[in-house]
Image (cartoon, grey):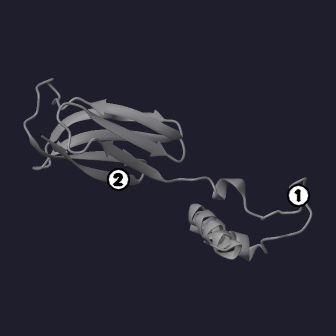
Amino acid sequence: MRTLKTITSALVISVLALIPIKAFSQFFISGGYQGGGHGSGGFTTGIQEEIIKATTSEILVFPNPFTDRLTINIKLGEETKVRLDIYDISNRLVCNIIPNSSLSAGRHIENWGGNDRKGNAVPRGVYYCRMVADENVLFKKIIKL
């Protein structure tokens, strides 16, 4: 059985993992707990709100491997211009799923039916899902059976 101290430590570590490094260091540089302050229950951080805004992007693909339909789950930390493409193992563009579109922060779901730009079914093999979100480029290896 875990003690309260162990559970508290795990919770603190979990919360700290969610805070961007810049915001974390800014918290300690500014003195962290200030006491009193603006109806916040006595806790102010001195951190600018825009610093702690999540800016991470993520893509998840499933099922992988797939046979006839792949679901692509996109997570954006902020509104971002996104391009989502599928490439084959030779780095040739197979199809464009999202063509340089501005997407809001949050989760977005796209589907790929295993077809190329002309609508033809692609053969079995290894492909890559490539997402460009502003300055971030993410890849996910996908396998079509």
Q: Which mark's residue is nearer the viewer, 2 or 1?
A: 1
* Residue 114 in picture, x, y percent from top left: 18, 32
Q: State whether residue 46 is above or below residue 115.
A: below
Going 89% across and 62% down the picture, which residue do you hit? 42
Quadrant location of the N terminus in the rendered image: bottom right
* Residue 97 in picture, x, y percent from top left: 29, 33
Q: 64 or 18: nearer the eye?
A: 64
Looking at the rendered structure, the secondary structure element under dot 2 is: strand
Label 2 to label 1, Cα distance in Å?
40 Å
Q: State whether residue 67 is above or below residue 143.
A: above
Q: Amino acid at mark 2?
A: Val
From the image, tell me which residue sits under label 2: 137
Q: State whether residue 65 is above or below residue 28.
A: above
Q: Amino acid at mark 1?
A: Gly
**N-terminal-most mark, 2 or 1:** 1
The extreme front residue here reads 1
How crowded pointer 2 is (Cα within 10 Å; few <14, some 14-19, many 20+) is rated as: some
Going 47% across and 35% down the picture, which residue do you hit? 103
Left or right: 130 with respect to 81?
A: left
Going 53% across and 53% down the picture, which residue do you hit? 55
* Mark sitting on residue 41: 1
* Residue 119 in picture, x, y percent from top left: 15, 23
